[in-house]
Amino acid sequence: MRAKASMDRREFLGATGVLTGMLAAGSPLALLAPSRAWALDLTALTSEEGAALLAAARTIAPHDKLDDAPYALVVQALDGNAARDAATLALLRQGVSGLGAGFASAPETERVVALQGVETTPFFKSVRATTLATLYASPLVYAYFGYEGEAFSKGGYLLRGFNDLRWLPEVPLADSGPVFGADSR
Amino acid sequence: MASISQDDNNAVVIIGSGAGGGTLAHELTRRGIKVVLLEAGARQSLASFSQVPGEAFAQLTWLEPRTQSGTTTVVEDYPTLPSWTAKTVGGTTVHWTAAALRARPWEVSTRTTYGTIDGASLIDWPLDYKELLHYYQIAEKRMVVTRRNGNPGLPASNHFKVLHYGAKRLGYKQVHTGYMAINSRPADDRGMCIQQGFCVQGCKTGAKWSTLYTEIPRAEATGNLELRAECRAVRIEHGTDGRVSAVVYRDSAGNEQRQKARVVCVACNAVETSRLLLLSDSARFPHGLANSSDQVGRHFCHHTGCFVWGVFEKPIEFWRGATLAGVVLDETRHDPKRGFAGGYHLELAALDLPSIAIAGFPQTLWGRKLGFVMEHYRSMAGIFLNGEDLPRSSNRITLNPNVKDQFGLPVANIHVDDHPNNAAMRRHGQQQAKALFEAAGAIQVLMSRQTPATHNMCVARMSRDPNDGVVNAHGQAHDVANLFVSDGSAMSTSTSANPTLTIVALALRQADYIERQMSTRAI
């Protein structure tokens, strides 16, 4: 993904489509991105197909307060798979076509019905798997879910809250173990 | 590190460097025996372990093609990953969660204890539990297991507090932070656990025991070990006397090499151990090496395993802390009144953000239900059920002639039909885990189906009667005196315990035996 200012490179790169979006003001992602506007070149899928797949990803893994940008990474992954493999391109193309022309802009309840209709197909399974594997793996979304990622570089959680839960009773020592540094408190 | 000639027919060749192979290599080399250790994977280090979940998986996992069949739900849910095994120096001891559990005493005599069960091919182990216990104790010292030998337990994490509270409310008695091969204080020239939570990605502090940075470098320091990483064994050869004589392998450039051997020990994790023996067929052993009994690859066990997740209202942050440091032992008993034979462990289990979505839930979960759960990722708790899997003769690893690997060799096919006992045990465990989380205040409970197995066992099992298995009580092939099986394949039955401690104990015992056999020139 890139900032929108460089969109004029699109024809030069031979892109087949493009997805664009705008990060919500105040979104945590806006702090990381060089610009609030973003654009994603597609290399196998059309813009319309990309938009339909983005809507499918949002329907499969709905998070209302999450920007479109991390969902666009799902489309980028699907597009990459399609660019590498003609069978995948055909699978996605036929699958999107089966969802109907208005899918991308339909209300969620209608999108859910459309996807339920294809739930057992290789198309849906492929889109679902790629959505989960891409969306939740992106460090862009870690903060949204409160996930802290790797901790080795910060010394782990030994002194940073691995046992700071207070809404349940403490575990007796016999079932637990000595806490590092607890003696010196 | 030693340099051992490929023509040295006095060398012991060990194939696979994990819990079994890595431990055996150290035990033999420290007694002065020359060992060539072949490992298909590359050598990582504490510094090179990736801390990006997906990257770490690719760095450590066997990702070459395998096929699968049978009625197990894994076929549908994980079409490209029938089994989750490692391909790296240190094997699965790099990605394991370090639960160092003993088999329960009756679990080595299940045929006697459980009786005849339709559709199950149970046998008793050909060794006494007391004998196994002796080696468990040595293994626990070696691996610095918590709650053994005066080692303190790991401190309770946020996540464990939930497990402990729910378990106690349910009336469970034996609930603690586990018997873990993770340093609760500095020991064994390794540091203590810093509760960073990335156990499965390779422990960057080395607080978790792994042959990669304990047994293997210590074996190298004896001057008797040559580790050859990125070398894939493809065939074991034998001489006219019917004894194995060499191992053919492909080096990192893909070139064929041949290492002569006095003794060969196979420790490639059950799927590849079966495949290698089956690939090593000959006029003398037309059905594969050590397979005159037609038992190689059969009785494949993988543990009855699935996740149960509790969704809570208040934060837990279960990724903080040692991934699996918590266990309930009460359900490991044999109590047919529950509707099944054998027992299971309830083990604390956390998954990182992508992994929980990819592998933690039913593959049918999506939409608002998925969205709700993921939005509660901070306030989730997890249990992994680890239960005894009953062996079936028809659950088996075979060669698939229709799919070939990069060397043109048929890949392994894993066939599993779930035994009804497993289904009953899984249901019971899921209900208990659900009740446990609800007792602790869960607002929702979710369950995965069977997950791809890391615990692969019993495909070259120890047996008293050579017709029932592949190896004797020392892991020595019934058919070939100088061929040994040194991984979980040799376990006679699966037990309810995560297998690593048992594999290490059996490797320690096997090393004693191999040394005696070599010193009397029996092999």
Image: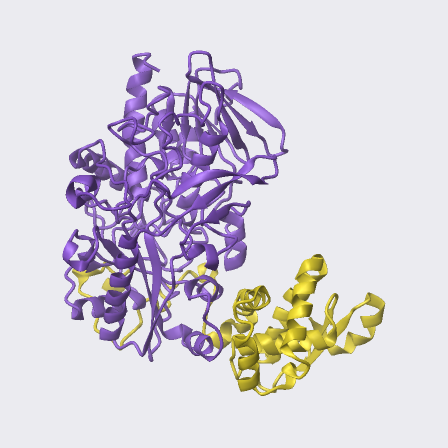
The correct choice, above or below, for B78 with respect to B246 in the image is below
Quadrant location of the C terminus of chain B in the rendered image: top left
The correct choice, above or below, for A53 with respect to B157 in the image is below
Residue at image x 52%, y 15%? B7
Image position, residue A33 (x, y; %): 64, 76
B50 or A111: nearer the eye? A111
Image position, residue B177 (x, y; %): 25, 58
In the rendered image, what is the letter of the chain coloured yellow? A
Residue at image x 39%, y 33%? B296
Chain B tint as drawn: purple
A107 relative to A93 in the view: left or right: left
Q: How many marks?
A: 0
Residue at image x 58%, y 24%? B257
In this view of the protein, can residue B212 be seen by the observer?
no
Image position, residue A37 (x, y; %): 69, 81
| Occupied quadrant, residue B252 | top right
The correct choice, above or below, for A71 with respect to B336 in the image is below
Residue at image x 19%, y 35%? B134
The correct choice, above or below, for B213 with respect to A2 in the image is above
Image position, residue B126 (x, y; %): 22, 31
B95 or A52: nearer the eye? A52
